[in-house]
Image (tube, rainbow, N blue to C red):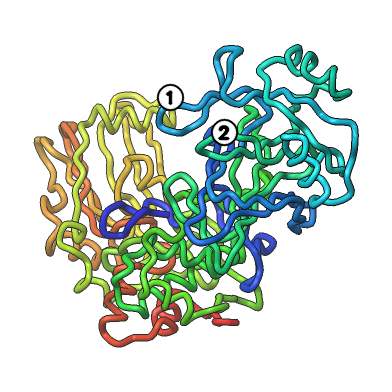
Amino acid sequence: MKKRILGILLASCMAFALLKLPASASTADGTVRIGLYYGSTALAAPQLQNFQGSGYQAGYYDDGEAFHSLYPISDTKVVILRDANYDRAANGTYAPASGTAATVGAYHVQLPATYATATQAQTAAKSAGGFAAYVDGAYRVRTGSYSTLLAAQSAGAPLGGTPVGGSSTCTTVIETESGSILFEYDGAQDFAMAPQGSNPATWCKGYKYYGNFAYPRASNGNLSVINYVSTEDYVKGVIPYEMSADWNVEALKAQAVCARSYAMSETKHKADGFDLCATTHCQVYHGLNNATANSDAAVDGTKGVYATANGKPVQLFYFSSDGGATEDAVNVWGGDYSYLVGKTDPYETAAVPEAKAVWSVTLTSAQVQSKIKAIDASFGTLSNLAVTKNTAVGNVLELTATDTSGKKVTISKAACRSTFSLNSQRYTITANGASTGTPAPASIGAGILSGFQKAMNGTSIGSASTSTAATGYTFHGTGWGHHVGMSQYGAKAMAEQGKSYADILNFYFTGITLSK
């Protein structure tokens, strides 16, 4: 959603798609799968390092999302590789080798014996000076690390072994510092690593996480990284990135319930093999780095609490600030949802920083015209742009652009914001440089508030018609985000006024029930 409420605009809480109520992604005491790196961001050589813990259990996840342990690894710093040649860079990272001489070779000698247990394979591997592998349901021992199949074949002949390597389904675990191969897995299920120890936490690309890590192959051959984590630990890794961790704990509790409800009701990445991603496309999740005693207390203080409406879990959308009023979901994304109803907000004004209280964006007529033509290529030379409909609480519902031939293009709902990359749907428009007409106020102040009051009384607001086309248009607005659901600054203000997290949620969401 956003990296930090005090620094970056919450452009979209969870999606700009139509709302839906999908199958549950997790239960409050269950596990949620978070895509940390996948698709084009999948990694060639993801690393793990124990922050708290004592090594790993290598294994796999079956189709029912159950983890199966295969092999213990006592090393605390490991790299996960495709079954390919790799070179070790000076900074300690590994990358696919460009030549035939590699730090870690993809080819090995597989000895003929099979073993029933990891312990047996571990003992045999130590005796042979090799490493254990789990291949098609059986433990094997492999030796050597060669850059070519021919080299492995030559080495294997005296041992009665078979040259192997370069499998598209094989995953190799190496020790980070030495590059020594610790274990290989070659099977149809997703290879995974489960950190061991008391309350283990693990470094992965600069962030600390609870939970396990799975490594399915991406379409480009690289390794996706999927964090299997409990719902509660996931929420602890979301809260300090979606709201400042030092805010009043009741505001953070409200945020925690929003994040948990979302995790329990959204599965937009099901086709990708996980539930949610770690970016603003879903909710920002970076594990333990920014968590504090205050933010963790907010999660613990609402443990298992989520929202329902009409007996079903629902997504509690949120955004930075509403500038005076939230909005009906139907007027932003479409879809008539009884718990996502706009209302005038008397709370947030005292909490919003001055820099975010008001905003303005000026575009030339040429820039506006270009954006309209992207919607309708037949649109001609821009003559006028005006707000032609407002919602009951004064947010913009409809804009109309007119060209010099009289052709009109109407933009509605969320497009009134996204078309012009505005901070919110709560604004008026000033036509700049027109020779006649009465433009909207040049500053937000009383002018925009007066305009919103007119809108609530049924009078449309916006820029007046002009006899000479404007040279540009200035959008004067308040609010930051999509306006559906909970204002985070409003939650902050309510908490500072002594309201509980339940008070906050029941104000911003109509007719919900907090369940556990």
Mark 1 residue crowding within 10 angstroms, few (<14) / some (14–19) / many (20+): few
* Image x and y of residue 498, in percent: 30, 87
Badge 1 marks a residue whose secondary structure is loop
Q: Is residue 260 left or right of residue 370?
A: right
* Image x and y of residue 111, in percent: 85, 30
Q: Is residue 67 left or right of residue 261?
A: right
* Image x and y of residue 153, in percent: 80, 16
Work out how far the residue at label 1 is from the one at label 2, CA to CA, in angstroms. Answer: 57 Å
Depth check, front residue: 346 or 62: 62
**Can see residue 335?**
yes
Compared with 207, 265 (above or below) is: below
Q: Which residue is mark 1?
A: 377
* Image x and y of residue 381, in percent: 29, 25
Compared with 263, 270 (above or below) is: above
Which residue corresponds to the image point at 30% horizontal and 80% vertical from the top-left? Answer: 494
Q: Is residue 453 left or right of residue 483?
A: left
